[in-house]
Amino acid sequence: MTGMSTMQVGRLFTRLQLILMCSFAPGWAVAGSLLDYLRDYDLNDYAFGIALSSGQNPYVGADSSTFAYPILTSFRDSTFTDDWLLLRDSDVGVRWVSAAGWELSGVARVQTLGFADSDSDQLLGVADRKWTVEAGPGIGFRAWPVHFYFKTYAEIGSRHDGLISQFDVSLPMEWSRGYFVPSIEASYLNDDYTDYYYAVTAAEATLLRPEYRAGAATNLALKARWGYAINQKWLLAGSVGFEQLDSAIANSPIVARDGVWSAGLSLAYNADVFQPREYDYSAPKVPKFTLKLGAFQDSASSKVRKDASNGEPGFEVDIEDILGAADESTVLQLDAIVRFGDYHRLEFGYFGFGRNSTKTLENDITIGDELFAAGTRLNTQVDTNIYHLGYGYSLMRDMQKELGIMAGIHFADFEANFLAETTGQTERSSLGTPLPFIGVQGAVFLSERTTLSAKIQIFRTDFDRYEGSLNYATLDLQYRLGDSASVGLGYNFYGLKLTSKESGVNGSLQVRHSGPVAFFTIGY
């Protein structure tokens, strides 16, 4: 392992976890039994509630944060059950628990570490650390009174591209009306992770805030979570924790603490809001063909770098901040779904828009073989079109829920043209390449007319002339007006990051689109 980077070591740990998970596959061998287990699951075993979370912010001058959010929770902690749906701390995922006490899981969480709305003078000139989604495998053992759990997160978005691994030792205790789970946790953060959140770049450095590289770090934490059933319908739960930060983090000029506290309190009510399960495994009646037309309030972020023909790196251009392109607009979105059989579906989707801007450059920038000097009035035209085609198979589909897997192709068509009229300089950067994806989609039927659904599609590549990632996610709440029409609200996210040596790109491209969507569907 001589010469391996921390990123490579982290990826090795992740692969070892996946190998261990696959080694237990014979225990899952009877596919029919596994599907029956999934399909027999009753979502009315869970309760809806509201949670209040408070935590110290480690950054200089940043205030502690307190916020409320809705939750889905269980009257029993996950350490005492073998439910395949895993809700633990900030994680949401799926798992399998063996008779011998092994727990294999795949989890995801939203990482919100950042400056929030801080107006601290000590953070002026420092780029905010933005939220992202992290996911990865986990493996645990719980046949003893003391439980062990190890998991590794990799980023789904394209913020830090780092890895964090956590090893947790807990002593779960349960009574007839409640539970208490104290734990000790060690977290290893690789250098990509810590440098994104705690480093100070040369551009951010000042006389009082020197340039700083954090490097890999290991944090230790003491945590506890508890729950108390007030009665058969109401659950009161909470958590508390203290994390001791590694000196590599605490010594950062933008960090003010060597440890942070966190606490949470929630109240949940089990109202059996999902469709009841007294049925003959029949699925809800839905149209065989559905056409969905939406208005997408898009917030866009685009960065492009085109290298010179001799391979010399070009300047990474932020099309919104540096070139003045609009970062918000209303975009039409079109989706079509064709269902056949009880569990199969084909999906097609499209959204696209164009933007034009003119701005006088404040600094020299190099795009491809062209140097556009400061003071040049640069016209920029950007066109983006996103298509996707996929096939989905529903592992379960009944009156209460639907959960399926997907595979297909995304096609990203991106073109940026740069023109300086006074000098006659022009440059063009384009991308038009198919990207395969895998994903999951699911829905819960809150009533005969109301459906909450979500979809996640991902792609990763590090091969030959291409390196990058694709992430696409949607969350919709839909209300049926009749047998053939529906209205709804949702939220969409699309992120593409690609580095290529192909002639059209010959550099890197990073595109992010996100925002709320209102839609109308018709079907038959």
Image (tube, helix red, strand yellow):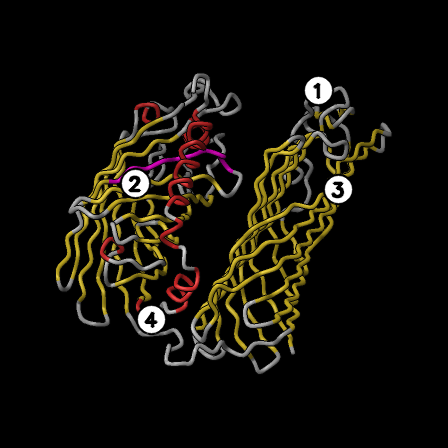
Residue 446 appears at what percent x and percent y?
43, 73
Q: Which mark is residue 415?
A: 3
3D distance between C-alphas at marks 4 and 1: 59 Å
Q: Which mark is residue 164?
A: none
Could you tell me what secondary structure mostly forms the magenta stretch? strand
Within-10-Å neighbours for mark 1: few <14, some 14–19, many 20+: few
In terms of secondary structure, where does tag 3 sit?
strand
3D distance between C-alphas at marks 3 and 4: 48 Å
Which of these two is toward me, 135 or 66? 135
Q: Which residue is mark 2?
A: 56
3D distance between C-alphas at marks 3 and 2: 43 Å
In terms of secondary structure, where does tag 2 sit?
loop
Identify the residue at horizontal 63%, vertical 51% (top origin).
Answer: 328
Q: Which residue is mark 4?
A: 44
Going from the N terminus, do you reach mark 3 or mark 4 first? Answer: 4
In terms of secondary structure, where does tag 4 sit?
helix
The image shows residue 426, relative to residue 150, as above or below, that is above
Check residue 329 for magenta coloring: no
3D distance between C-alphas at marks 3 and 1: 21 Å
Residue 402 appears at what percent x and percent y?
48, 67
> What type is the residue that disc 2 sits on?
Gln
Camera-nearest label, 2 or 1: 1
Asked if labels 2 and 3 touch by Cβ distance under 8 angstroms, the answer is no
Asked if labels 2 and 4 touch by Cβ distance under 8 angstroms, the answer is no
Region in magenta: 159-168
Going from the N terminus, do you reach mark 2 or mark 1 first? Answer: 2
Q: Which residue is mark 1?
A: 312
3D distance between C-alphas at marks 4 and 2: 35 Å
